Amino acid sequence: QVQLVESGGGLVQPGGSLRLSCAASGSIDSFYAMGWYRQTPGAQRESVAGIISGGSTNYADSVKGRFTISRDNAKNTVYLQMNNLKPEDTAVYYCYADNSPRKRRDYWGQGTQVTVSS
């Protein structure tokens, strides 16, 4: 069973930056896709960014131009670089991994809190 562990969350002022990491307990070479969701209390989990094995990426409209997802297969880690953070980016961020194009979100991390506040 693969485990995903997120890190890098914290408190940051508006306009600041954070880099989230998602480290897998094993090789990520076999994953079709990995990515990030976020969730605020009382709301559904929403997709933030994804990256497939070929390197193609996708982003929610709300984060385009500010967030960048990347994948380092040698380190079995996916990153989410978040710049120009806004208070509305405050949420728990979850990492996922898919074994196939079916978007089943086969594995999830435990989440890391990001708070954007002055």
Image (spheres, grey):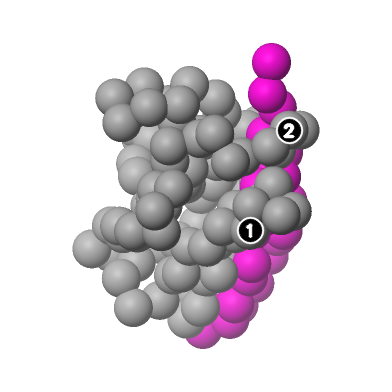
| Residue 5 position in % (x across, y down) | 72, 38
Amino acid at circle 1: Asp
Q: Position of residue 42 (x, y in %)?
A: 39, 31
Seen in the picture, residue 79 relative to 117 is either above or below; the reply is above
Name above or below for residue 67 compared with residue 50: below
Q: Position of residue 98 (x, y in %)?
A: 44, 30
In the image, what residue occupies the spot 54% across and 46% down? 93
Say if 50 sits above or below 87 in the image.
above
- Residue type at mark 2? Gly
Q: Circle 1 is placed at which residue position?
A: 72
User: Does residue 17 appear in this view?
Assistant: yes
Q: Which residues are magenta?
A: 1-23
- Disc 2 marks which residue? 26
Residue 1 found in image quarter: top right
* Mark 2 crowd level (few <14, some 14–19, many ≥20, 10 Å Cα): some
Confirm whether the magenta stretch covers residue 107. no
Query: At x 43% / y 41%, what residue is drawn?
Result: 33
